[in-house]
Image (cartoon, coloured by chain):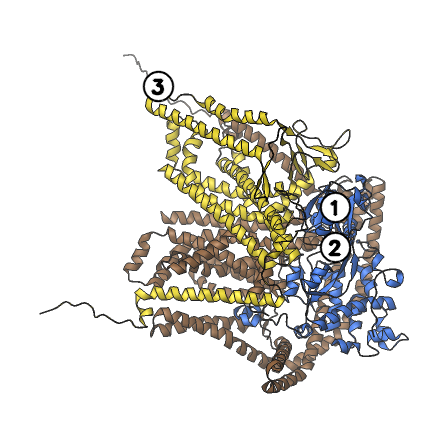
Amino acid sequence: MKKSVILGALTVAGLAAGAASAATLDDVKARGQLNCGINTGLVGFAAPDANGEWSGFDVAYCRALAAAVLGDPSAIEFVSLTGKTRFTALASGEIDVLSRNTTWTLTRDVDLKFTFLGVNYYDGQGFMVPKDLGVTSAKELDGATVCIQTGTTTELNLADFFRVNNMSYEPVPIETNAEAQQQFLAGACDVYTTDASGLAATRATFETPGDYAILPEIISKEPLGPLARHGDDEWADIGRWVLNALIAAEEYGVTSANIDEMAAEPTDNPEINRLLGTEGNMGEMLGLSADWAVNAIKAGGNYGELFEKYIGENTPVGLARGLNAQYTDGGLMYSPPVR
Amino acid sequence: MTMSSDAPKESFRLSMLIYDTRYRSLTIQVVALMAFMLAAAWIIDNTLQNLAELGKPIEFGFLSEPAQYDINQALIEYDNQDSHLRASFVGLLNTLLVAVLGCALATVVGVIVGVLRLSKNWLVARIMTVYVEMFRNVPVLLWIVFFMAILIESLPQPRAFRGADPEASMLLGDSVALTNRGFYIPEPLFSNPLGDLSVFGAFNISLELLALVGALAVSLFLSGLVKKRADRIQNETGIRPTTWYLRLGIVVLPLIAILIALGFHLGNPELRGFNFQGGIHMRTSLIALWLALSFYTAAFIAEIVRGGIMAISKGQTEAASALGLRPNRIMSLVILPQALRVIIPPLISQYLNLTKNSSLAIAVGYMDITGTLGGITMNQTGRELECVVMLMLCYLTISLTISLVMNWYNTRVKLVER
Amino acid sequence: MSDLSYVRKEMLAEQSPPATEIGIIGWLRENLFSNWFNGILTVLSLVFIYAVFSAILPWLLHSSWTANSLNECRQQVDAAYGLAAEGGCWAVIRERYLQLIFGFYPSDLYWRPLLAFGVALVALAPVLFTGLPRQMLWFSPFAPFLVPWLLWGGAVWLPLMVIVGFVLAYVVTRVLSAVMPGLLAVPVAALAAVLWWLYAVAPINDGLTVLIANQRIDAVATDMREQADRLPGEIAALDSRIADLRDQVATSEAEKDALFAELEEDHGSEAARQAVLQAIADLRGPRDALAALEKERLGLNEDLSHARSLLAGIEELPALRERRDALLAEQRMARGEEAEEIANQLATLDTQIAGVVDELGRVGLVPVESRKFGGFMLSITIGLVAITVSLPIGVMLALGRQSNLFILRAICVGFIEFIRGVPLITLLFVASVLLNYFLPPGTSFDIILRVIIMVTLFASAYMAEVVRGGLAALPKGQYEAADALGLDYWKAQRLIIMPQALKISIPGIVSTFIGIFKDTTLVSIIGLLDPLGLSNAIRANTAWNGIVWELYGFIALMFFVFCFSMSRYSMWLERKLQTGHR
């Protein structure tokens, strides 16, 4: 039973919000709201505007998921999480899905008991240096002072990289990207290392971006994606296929502009028809309405549109598609068939 | 005939547990104990059940696994292949370092400010009031972040020291470099080193340091003997022999002799590669944290000191000036010793606060125990319960130790007074 | 006889003191240069003041207040004060101050937290200022129920029913104490109150809600249908206006950027500078209009999605109820795992139905989840709740610590010393990662409630020490007098000891509150959006990425204003109490 918070505080039993029960989908539907874990603030991926509305690339996935499940992209409760609190929040059932640029690793999948729903951004750890340092390769960084964000896989990668190459370095651990940026600009560290997307996003907001270079070496694989708890495969399926639908929509040329038209009646392409629910019963199989994918795509656009809107080359973040292009364009974005 | 008789001896009835004051306190205590045990059992049972559900039984094996991360400031040897336990220990030492440094500086600044707030100099008194109010009324976390930002933005980076006509230069005859990566100061070096002493194979202590500390202890003891003798002569004859040069010599000469024997010299930092090499590197994070904690706590200590001084009645000052003592001697010989009795108990709790506040080090990336055990280790291993419990135990031990030591000192001061 | 007088007869006229002892010079000599040491101190102080102001003032004076991004701030400062000028970008505060104060609280409901804190102040006023009429005290006990209701919302009868629980406890105590000793009566009364809250409040609340919901359902459905039909059109109209305005703003912005590029090329000619400033000033009107429109759209969007979901809920309601009845019938037959499965389904169904019915039958305030709390409002809420709740706990702990019951004392001392021995941040770690483990499986508290719980425990330990100080300061005669009057322990505490001890403790309580209030900044470390956490989130916006001093400065200033006024109050009170005792 839903009870007010005051009452709830008195009746501890009333606070058993049925968290972490077997069927997340039912909980979400009953609640009428998706609880989505996001970053406390990362340029291009999650940030609140003056009205308190969150937006960004990671946030967009949450909105698409809420639209697919509940038919309303604004039926979300955003829970901002730090690198430290994100996994416990997901494990304890405080959030239904975590979309907080989290790297897919074996230990997180197996030991921490989460299910990764796919990859929404292929990233890798890179280095940024001031140009007048005269460094052109990460191999020349012996003895350098390196700014890293704690609570991520980057510090482990960094330790490995310098150990393998027999170099020494001085780590400067930092909590947030904003502080790292400040230290790097002031020269308190020679090098700033984090995911290449983060480097580009950070560089874009400098007063003189041209004075800084991103080194060619990418020292790690960082497949970032949303994740859910182990043990609820139906919910994981929904999360996975919402992401796939966004990617597939781009492949088939379904955009937020033409989707109403395409969803109105079956097109020539059966794949599109199955995706948009004009053919087959994919929605029903997932436990959703037939127009789940339509809602998801309408929430913000297909994968490509989201990319361009929040982190693409025309935004201040200015990322090229690179690995994140469709496989047809030489990238890694590849949605399994909707069949 | 009347007979006084004892009240009839009642046999024990159950209601006496509540009505009879003899048993009532026992009843309450037993009930309280049972309630407490029940609550504890309930929590432990819940925890075990929850952890079992998550498949994370409580175990501390992860502590011996390689930590895999680097720590920039390690007082004992450490590299990323060492265990989580060692990483935690490195963090603990860092916590202790900043706590000790912070308490020392906070005391010095606090006493100076507290005395200056009572100064007759209008301007100085006002500035000190502004300082105290500014620091007391803004959260310490903000101050830590502020100090870090100020150091980073205002000091030159190492690159600025390079070139024929550098923008920045080293101080004190090229021996000290103040950069925004930290302060580089000369380090003591020995040309005839004695080597290191390994303690339990866990970490090394330099024998030179041990030799110096030992020599200092012995000479201080000898100097104490000289003072005692002087006291005795003064008591007997009323004339105090001049002993300061003798005592100074006893303390200083052996130290100098050992230093010369070991071939003591200073190693200056030099700009090589990206950074200064050699010398002692005090990182910006340490300095920012140290200064912020010290100045924040000093504002409270200043108020304590001021309160302590004002608690000494004016008659004491007047009596002291009537004896012909100069104002600074009045302060050091008459006022402060008495004020200390009022000052020390709250001072202890300020030291405790400073130590606990040092856990905010993660805001500036200083790798204290909260940053290692409660930060990266917890995050990488996912062992929240174990890490947080160990973290709490560490702080609890430190706090209780400080309390005990300072309380012991406090009672000693009191005894001396009487 | 000649007058041989050696005594002067007429008074000498009063001479003015030497010029060095009066006026400004005299004041300076006395207060700044009374001896060489003070002279040096004065000179050093002057140098220090000059250094501080020369570093900060130009930056403060060359500030930008109207830009809408850090880049534009730089442009505006460059255009107004020359290309080399550096200045503050206070525009970020202008844009975000409401967010920094209220967090994510719905903007049309800002009156509620304001009113709540007003109520709290009015309730505290008679306690804090003895000069006020005593009748105001009658209002104070209601504030603890009124304030949470205003902040979190909910049905209007909820706070009333919570109060009824306390009244019930009081009545039961009075009735029972006639027939049994207080030691038994009090726990029984407490049990009665808890039973009332646990088992009576929810059914009554639900019953009332359903009653009202059934009456309203048709009217609401019509209303929602009307909204669902009307709003899409309005939104579309608004969208086109927004799109036009956006284009207009984008064009003007591009023009402004071009103008600034020109300015940089010709190294700051007066005309170019004026042009850029004018362009930025001209942008303000359209931008404000755009922001207003976007806000309106956001509101309409919310209304629409609310109307739609409620409508869907209303339409679904009969079917849901039918299914519930069917499930209930099935449940009677089912056994074992099957029954559990059905119970699960029923729970979900109940939540779904309750969601709709609550919405329909609400007489009161719109509920606001605590996740929406942020900024200073979050800090103040945590501080206020923690202090209010910790006061009774602290009193109990202090009494326990002073009592001669060994086990009770040991438990209290253990608790107090444990909490005081660990830093608050570790307790916040407990709140964020461990507290859910301590509760029965499946229970989940909101993170903000968890934090409030831990901060309350933290505050209780400190409060206990403050109260203990107050108890220790009472003369022993007071205890003995109470004993002599034949009062029992609780009566003595209630009538003699506590009123006096608490009065002496008020300064200590206020400084504990200041400490707790400042410590709430720590919640940013576990990801809550208090002012510091929000400053980080604001910097994640591409427009404001790279801003440091302005946000920290604003936050520090706000904290200073709050804490400084409270500490002044505490000092005033201390002085007053001192004279009162002599």
Residue B167, percent from left and from top:
74, 32
Q: CA distance from mark 2 to mark 1?
A: 28 Å
The reply, left or right, for residue C421 in relation to residue B335 is: right
Residues at marks 2 and 3 on the same chain:
no
Q: Which chain is blue?
A: A
Residue at figure coordinates x 45%, y 64% from the top left: B36
Q: Is residue C177 visible?
A: yes
Three-letter amino acid code at disc 1? Answer: Phe
Disc 3 designates what residue?
A: C8
Relative to residue A11, is residue B113 depicted above or below? above
Relative to residue A307, is residue B262 depicted above or below? above
Q: Which chain is yellow?
A: B
Q: Which is nearer the N-term, disc 2 or disc 1?
A: 2
Which of the two residues, A143 or C202, is positioned nearer the viewer here? A143
Residue C439: which quarter of the image?
A: bottom right
Residues at marks 2 and 1 on the same chain:
yes
**Pointer 1 chain:** A
Residue A43 numbered mark, or none: 2
Residue A162 numbered mark, or none: 1
Q: CA distance from mark 2 to mark 3?
A: 91 Å
Residue C305: which quarter of the image?
A: bottom right
The reply, left or right, for residue C523 in relation to residue A308 is: left
Q: Residue furthest left?
A: B1
Which of the two residues, C192 or B318, is positioned nearer the viewer here? C192
The quadrant of the rendering that contains the C terminus of chain B is top left
Residue C346, percent from left and from top:
62, 80
Which of the two residues, C397 or C228, is positioned nearer the viewer here? C397
Three-letter amino acid code at disc 3? Answer: Arg
Q: Which mark is in front, 2 or 3?
A: 2
Residue contact at pointers 3 and 1, CB within 8 angstroms: no
